[in-house]
Amino acid sequence: MATGSATHPALLGVRTTATHCPYCSLQCGMEIAPGQDGAPEITPLDFPSNRGGLCRKGYTAASLLGHPERLRTPLVRDATGKLGPAGWDDALDRIAEGIADCQAEHGREAVGVFGGGGLTNEKAYQLGKFARVALRTPSIDYNGRFCMSSAATAANKALGIDRGLPFPLSDVGDADAVLLAGSNIAETMPPAVSRLDDLVAGGGALIVAAPRVTETARLATVHLQLTPGTDLVLANGLLHVAIREGLVDEDYVAQRTTGFERVRRRLGSYWPDRVERITGVPVSELRRAAALLAEAESAMVLTGRGPEQQHQGTDTVLAFINLALALGLPGRPRSGWGCLTGQGNGQGGREHGQKADQLPGYRRITDPADRAHVAGVWGVDPDDLPGEGRSAWEMLEAMGAPGGVRALLVMGSNPVVSAPNAGVVEERLRALDLLVVADVFLSDTAKLADVVLPTTQWAEETGTMTNVEGRVVLRRAAMAPEEGVRSDLEILSGLAERLGCGERFAPEPEAVFAELGRASAGGRADYAGMTYERIAAHDGLFWPCPDEAHPGTPRLFADGFATDDGRARFHPVSHRPPAEPTDEEFPLLLTTGRVALQYQSGTQTLRVQELCEEGDAEAFVELHPALARRHAISEGSCVWLRSRRGTAAGRARLTPDIGLDMVFMPFHWGGDGRANLLTNPVLDPASGMPGFKLCAARIERVEDAAPRREEPVT
Ligand code: SF4
């Protein structure tokens, strides 16, 4: 897909700037400086999250600047159905008219907003405010619902607050034992592996729970290679062993938690032999892992998308939190439970109002006091704020239906590739009365839009991101924006002006951040004491940070949990069978995930020539050689994966590192290579998270298969 990089003359103004990577939640520190030809070059910085490391994505991110496929003018679809260049005023007028027409005919909720976990805090905040104040619609959610919501829901239930890691990453390297469940950080955030190296070098134990032999699993002291979808059983099994072998920290449980007895009773049926039968993890390894965790002086339980992206994701994370609480870990030095966020601002993106049920600072949109506080900052009547809207998938699924969205503004997201059951999402997006997409490149979703707005890139704009640790970092602009593009904040300001409330939407990031601080003041994610200057001076600040004299809060829970009584809550949870069992027609378990050289829906990284030349430029499917033999599939041949929802194409990669009845397909590619054409949109009932990680599928050699149903994306 990559068509090469080019240095645009406008980039010659690049200046030496300390900033952060455009991609994942590690938010590695990097310096952008002019190279010999004036084009930007990237070198790593010794920032606390990356300690001088970058992955290949970070090193090559400058290729995105001045890229020949960069959008540089708005595009508007004409009466013949073609997208063509337009002026900014024409494009924004067309959107404002479309919004007004749609709301007049179908009501305010018929206009929706779909945001992203890669947007800066300022943009996420402003997008939420734009939906509630300018559009007065409850219809807003974002793609972070697809990756973080189960962990967030579980953390809120058990600990009273959701901050991915309640401690700095440095604590991971200092721990004596770490259980990493369903996270492949050796591929997704390689610089963080140095923390695991520290752990092992210090004599600590790394326990990895993962269905495949991933790069991270290869580093493990113990690899618990479980059957996909059985993470909850594994966690309950570990706790069962801990209880039976007297490894529970009874003093901690008595003094700092409630509800353990109900969990103890529930776990009676998770005896090791049964756990082995369900998970495939041998009893001996289960016992060894439980002992390593429980007998370590300090230990951590960390979860990733594996346990979370399931129809029982919240319960699965709660099972791991139960384990951590029973061992007395949260709030103890170099110990605890944490969740490893994925997207660049996966943490901040969910704190400041993009979620259908949230207002800034983790306030709840259904809470009268929370509504009054935020309405006061916004200068509106609390009664004018809409209520709770639908979660991301529910909003996408209801597009065009009675009461559903008929016009959608998409910012920082590519749901045609990243949403589950993507074929249906594509169909419904095509049928909208108005689809507006703001993006840097013509993503698969932007190709369907009625209006496409070209936006600034990370190195052209300043804003804050909240990284995997809960550390708020300042991503500074290193150059002026290319001619013809506007920042998302400028776009929202321009639209708000046309909707009659422009004075409430500042386009300058620092002004928006100051307002965000006021809106979050007193909330759980309190940014009130942060300024750009303070963030820069301290290598980032951890929330909560309620006033300008406050140093920030790197570690939570030392003195109590964020619950009414200060105690953490145990929750008894039980395994439920897969939402979609395998059968004769679909006999394989399909699981999805990421690879080292691509990021999210590939809109950016698939355009970086260096990354595509190194590999993974096109969709692939991993399968065991024995399974391949059964279907006469050879390495590199084209295969089709089919599920009950659709068909996706990819090249076969044969590996013994995967189970015999399993296939793995990463989700980075568009068109026919979309893994999400296959995935099951069944939702976790508590979080609204779709079950991306597991569905039933079958594999076919291309020459054996019947013609495909889907049309290519145009
Ligand atoms: Fe760091 Fe993540 Fe960027 Fe790689 S993609 S350089 S790990 S922030």
Image (cartoon, helix red, strand yellow):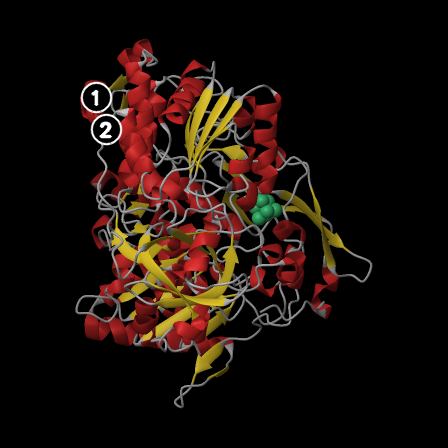
Given residues 319 and 559, the one toward you in this image is: 319
Whether residue 132 appears in this view of the structure is no
Given residues 490 and 51, the one toward you in this image is: 51
Q: Amino acid at mark 2?
A: His
Whether residue 647 appears in this view of the structure is yes
User: Percent position (x, y) of residue 365?
Assistant: 25, 46
Is 69 drawn above or below residue 515 in the view shown? below
As helix, strand or loop, the secondary structure at mark 1 comes to loop
Is 406 drawn above or below residue 90 in the view shown? above
Q: Amino acid at mark 1?
A: Gly
Given residues 323 and 564, the one toward you in this image is: 323
Which of marks 1 and 2 precedes in the sequence?
1
As helix, strand or loop, the secondary structure at mark 2 comes to loop
Return the mark for residue 571: 2
> Residue at position x 58%, y 35% from top?
193
User: Percent position (x, y) of residue 217?
Assistant: 51, 37
Quadrant assignment for the C terminus: bottom left
Residue labelled with disc 1: 259
Is 79 drawn above or below residue 520 in the view shown? below
Q: Is residue 128 left or right of residue 580?
A: right
User: Percent position (x, y) of residue 657?
Assistant: 49, 45
Instruction: Give the alpha-carbon distance from disc 2 to disc 1, as whole Å.
Output: 7 Å
- Label 1 Cα crowd, 10 Å radius (few <14 / some 14-19 / many 20+): some
Q: Which residue reaches farthest right?
A: 36
> Residue at position x 31%, y 62% from top?
643
> Residue at position x 62%, y 37% from top?
50
User: Percent position (x, y) of residue 158?
Assistant: 29, 29
Q: Are marks 2 and 1 in contact (CB under 8 Å)?
A: yes
- Label 2 Cα crowd, 10 Å radius (few <14 / some 14-19 / many 20+): many
> In terms of image quadrants, where is residue 538?
top right
Q: Which residue reaches farthest top?
A: 251
